[in-house]
Image (cartoon, rainbow, N blue to C red):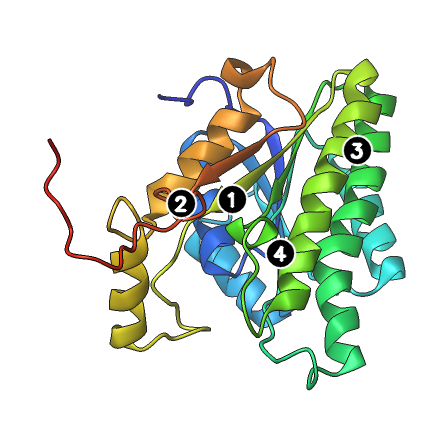
Amino acid sequence: MHFAEEFKDKKVIVTGACGIIGGWIAEAFRDAGAQLCLTDRDEAKLAATLERLGGGDQHFAIAADLMDADALASFAEKVKQRWSAPDIVVNNAGIYPSGFLLDIDVADWDAIMGVNLRAPFILSKLFARQMIDAGKRGAIINISSGAARKMRTTVVPYCLSKTALDRLTKGFALELAEYGIRVNAVEPGFIAGSNVSQLPDEHVETVTASIPLRRSSSPKDVASAVLYIASDAASYVTGATLAVDGGNSIGSQAVFQAKKKAL
């Protein structure tokens, strides 16, 4: 599916733009002709990401701490001054601290909920108001996870934050429908590590073997899903969560007996 004409000059916000998934999504919208507003906490990395994407006058970046409500309000105001309102908002930023519930600090809990849940709530609210004032029938897309439906040891707070994000997605979809603003979620599949989060080869092999389609996510997988959900092809889709994970979240294929051949 090609979106070159549909997204030409559309104004798209991507949070967590310095991360691997955020980068994939930003690149896909850039290639489809959209104008980008990128945000992340690290100003230096954000500048480097913008330069890698080909900066230019049509793209810009604003550093913001998603834990700071005032910073989010300032970010939204800067977007309003430049664009009046975005057409598409991708709440991609997320953090994944690991720790058993008996060990995890309250500060880590608050950070997970703050970045993964509170920030999408605040930004969706602020940018939806801009869309309404500008008369735009926009789209908001939350990047969720199969962890929303499949609990994982040592990352329980992350799982809870994504479960709540899915419910928040449906709540916003319900309340913004009258304005023609669609709100959906996309669940990316397993990514075999990055510069920020490196994974041992043994771990990657084990996880990949457990995925029904037997591979990790590629750059085009999640990006294509996000562009589809944001497009007119999905104009009747709201409040939905699209899993793009090779079947990883639907169940296990493990068997505890000699595997029989299919009939």
Viewer-nearest of labels 4 and 1? 1
Say which quadrant the N terminus sits in.
top left
Viewer-nearest of labels 3 and 4? 3
Question: Residue 251's x, y, as percent?
Answer: 41, 47
Q: Which of the two labelled residues, at mark 2 and mark 3, occupies the earlier sequence position?
A: 3
Q: Label 2 vs label 1: CA separation?
A: 7 Å
Q: Which mark is residue 263?
A: none
Q: Which of the two labelled residues, at mark 1 and mark 3, occupies the earlier sequence position?
A: 3
For image coordinates 77% across by 62% down, the residue present is 114
Viewer-nearest of labels 2 and 4? 2
Q: Which one is nearer the viewer's eye here, 43 or 171?
A: 171
Q: Label 4 vs label 1: CA separation?
A: 13 Å
Q: Residues within 10 Å of mark 4 (few under 14, many from 20)?
A: many
Q: Label 3 vs label 4: CA separation?
A: 20 Å
Is residue 188 in view? Answer: yes
Q: Which mark is residue 93?
A: 4
Q: Residue at the front extreme?
A: 257
Residue receiving disc 2: 245
Q: Is residue 81 left or right of residue 138?
A: right
Tag 1: residue type?
Answer: Glu
Look at the numbered discs 2 and 1 and tell me whether their residues touch, using CB distance below 8 Å: yes
Q: Is residue 228 left or right of residue 174?
A: left
Look at the numbered discs 4 and 1 and tell me whether their residues touch, using CB distance below 8 Å: no
Tag 4: residue type?
Answer: Ala
Determine the image quadrant of residue 35: top right
Q: Residues within 10 Å of mark 1 (few under 14, many from 20)?
A: many
Q: Label 2 vs label 4: CA separation?
A: 18 Å
Q: Which mark is residue 187?
A: 1
Q: Secondary structure at mark 3?
A: helix
